[in-house]
Structures are given as C-alpha cells and as structure tokens.
Image (tube, grey):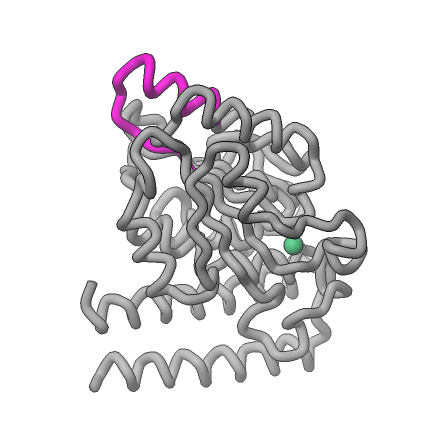
C-alpha cells in the first residue's frame, strides 16, 4: 500500500461524505451521524478488501457484506454506487416517490446481501453464510458491520457463540464503536465495557483500531484471518458524524437533515480536507 493509494482512498471517503450530505439534504431525511461514522470502514471494504464484480452481484464466489446497522443506508448506497453496482442517478432520487433506494437497505438494490434495519439480525445471517462457505468450499468471506447500540441485542451474542463454535475464520464482525446511539450515550443505555474482552470471551480474535484511520483499517483487513480457526471481531473506534464539525459527537444528529447553511458549511469543511489529502498525495 503506497502513500498515494492511501490518500486516494481517503479522498474517496471524503467525497463519499459529501455525497451522503447531499443525499440527506436533497432527500430531506437520513441517518447522518451513523453514515458519516462508518464511511471509512465501507470505503476500505469496497475499494480494498472485498472481492466482488459489480457486473455480477450474485456471483457465487463473491465476498459477502451485510450492513447490519441498516439505518446507515445512505453511506452504503453512496459506496455501492461508486463501486459500480448502480448509477449515481439513483442517489439523486433518494427520498422521492418511486425511488429505488429506501431508508433501509432492501434486496432490490444491487449489492445488498440482506435487508436490514431491525438490529441484531446481520450477524446471525452472516454466521449462516460463513457456515455455508465452509461446507461448500466456495472460498468467500463474510463481513458484518454492526452498530455499538446494536450490541445490546441478544441475538448478536447467540451468533457470536455460534461463530466460534463452528470455527468460522471466514467471518469478520466489525463494530462501529462511536459511543452514541439514537437515544444518547451507549453506556448510559446499556453499558458495553469491556466490549473487547466480552468478544474475546466468546472465542473471537479481537482487533482494536481507529475506525476512521484508513491506514489502520487496511492493515486490519490485510491481516485476515487475525487468528486461523477463529472468527475476527474488528472493534473500530469511530466518531459519530466524522468529518463535519457540527455533527461530530452529537447524538442529536442520529437522524437529522441539515439546513441550507449547514449543508453548505459541510461541503466547505469536506472540500478543505480533500485539498489537504490531495496536497499530501502530490508530495
Ligand atoms: Mg453508535
């Protein structure tokens, strides 16, 4: 991974944040904070780690990705579109009557592996996909992105138990650990700490990283499986609303539409970050 390639992916992530802000602003709705939080993870997956052909979204050997925190659909749609699964024009239809993109992922969207939104369902299905791969010898991997608020769902822990029971080292769980959920601080709603130790106790190999650091994300994905014979859990510490100053760390932005002034400011801030990345890439 060269420095230029790293900066290329950082710029894609920043441009994706701009597209997310545009979708939410023009569509008049969306899960702004959580989409911005997980953009770097999605970009590292779709532009570096995952093996897929957007022209053949049902190819049997493709890596699987499940957006278990389905409310962050805007981030997923922007990345899927840029990766070539469907035209950018679909993003512009978001929020309008007849749009092919809904507020949570559906199976009608190319690249979506599972309809999600009701939390706690992605990892159990991911376990099934990974188990099928082991039995069929298909050679694909399954990645599941969960929210930290989602960790309060009991079905997550049933799946965690099953994942290690079946030695699914082709399964990767990722927690977007931004510390906030719809109703406030995750630890005020249902304390997760010590989350890494809990996953380890369920038999997973835990890798803790800064989930907004592209270099750390690529290193974690390049080192899979983190421990042969075990599923991997990437504990990705993130900032909810990452990249836009007035959204960062604000639970109130879980689902919120910017005003015109706020939208314009977001673009100015993101363009400034893109300029810094572009300058560093040129050095
Ligand atoms: Mg959260």
Task: Say which residue appears at 78% left-offset and 59% top-offset.
Answer: 184
What residue is rendered at 47% in x and 26% in y?
163
Query: Which residue reaches farthest top?
Result: 135
The vertical placement of 146 against 253, above or below, is: above
* Quarter of the figure with the N terminus: bottom left
Is residue 76 positioned above or below 166 on the image? below
Q: Tell whether position 85 is magenta.
A: no
Residue 18: x and y in percent read 51, 69
In the image, is 58 to the left or to the right of 91? left
Q: Residue 106 falls in which quadrant of the image?
A: top right
Residue 152 in the image: state x and y as whole percent: 71, 40
For the image, the number of numbered tags is 0
Image quarter in which the C terminus is found? bottom left
Measuring from the top left, give residue 154's x and y in whole percent: 69, 31
Left or right for 16, reference 191? left
What segment carries the magenta color? 127-143
Instruction: Using the rendered image of the protein, determine whether residue 182 is visible from the camera's viewpoint.
Output: yes
In the rendered image, residue 260, in percent from the top left (x then y), is placed at 69, 77
Residue at image point 48% right, 54% down? 78
Q: Residue at x 30, y 26 (%)?
A: 59
Magenta run includes residue 137: yes
The residue nearer to you, when weighing 227 against 258, is 227
- For ligand 1, give the image quadrant: bottom right
The answer to whether 176 appears left or right of 193 in the picture is left
Residue 99 visible (yes or no): no
**66 is higher (above) or lower (below) than 211:** above
């Amino acid at each position: 991974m060269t420095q230029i390639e790293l900066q290329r992916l950082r710029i894609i992530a920043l441009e994706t944040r701009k597209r997310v802000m545009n979708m939410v602003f023009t569509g008049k709705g969306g899960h702004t904070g959580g989409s911005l939080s997980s953009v770097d993870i999605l970009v590292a997956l779709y532009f570096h780690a995952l093996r897929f052909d957007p022209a053949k979204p049902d190819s049997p050997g493709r890596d699987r990705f499940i957006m278990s925190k389905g409310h962050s659909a805007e981030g997923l749609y922007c990345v899927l579109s840029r990766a070539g699964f469907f035209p950018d024009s679909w993003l512009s239809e978001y929020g309008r009557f007849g749009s092919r993109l809904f507020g949570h992922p559906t199976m009608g969207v190319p690249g979506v592996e599972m309809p999600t939104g009701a939390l706690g369902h992605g990892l159990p299905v991911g376990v099934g996909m990974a188990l099928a791969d082991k039995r069929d010898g298909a050679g694909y991997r399954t990645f599941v992105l969960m929210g930290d608020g989602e960790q309060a769902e009991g079905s997550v822990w049933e799946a965690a138990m099953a994942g290690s029971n079946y030695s699914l080292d082709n399964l990767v769980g990722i927690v977007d650990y931004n510390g906030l959920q719809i109703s406030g601080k995750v630890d005020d709603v249902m304390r997760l700490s010590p989350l890494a130790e809990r996953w380890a106790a369920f038999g997973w190999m835990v890798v803790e990283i800064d989930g907004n650091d592209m270099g750390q994300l690529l290193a974690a994905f390049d080192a899979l499986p983190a421990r042969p014979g075990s599923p991997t859990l990437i504990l990705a510490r993130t900032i909810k609303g990452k990249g836009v100053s007035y959204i960062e760390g604000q639970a109130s932005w879980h689902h919120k539409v910017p005003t015109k002034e706020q939208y314009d400011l977001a673009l100015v801030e993101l363009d400034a970050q893109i300029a810094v990345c572009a300058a560093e890439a040129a050095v």
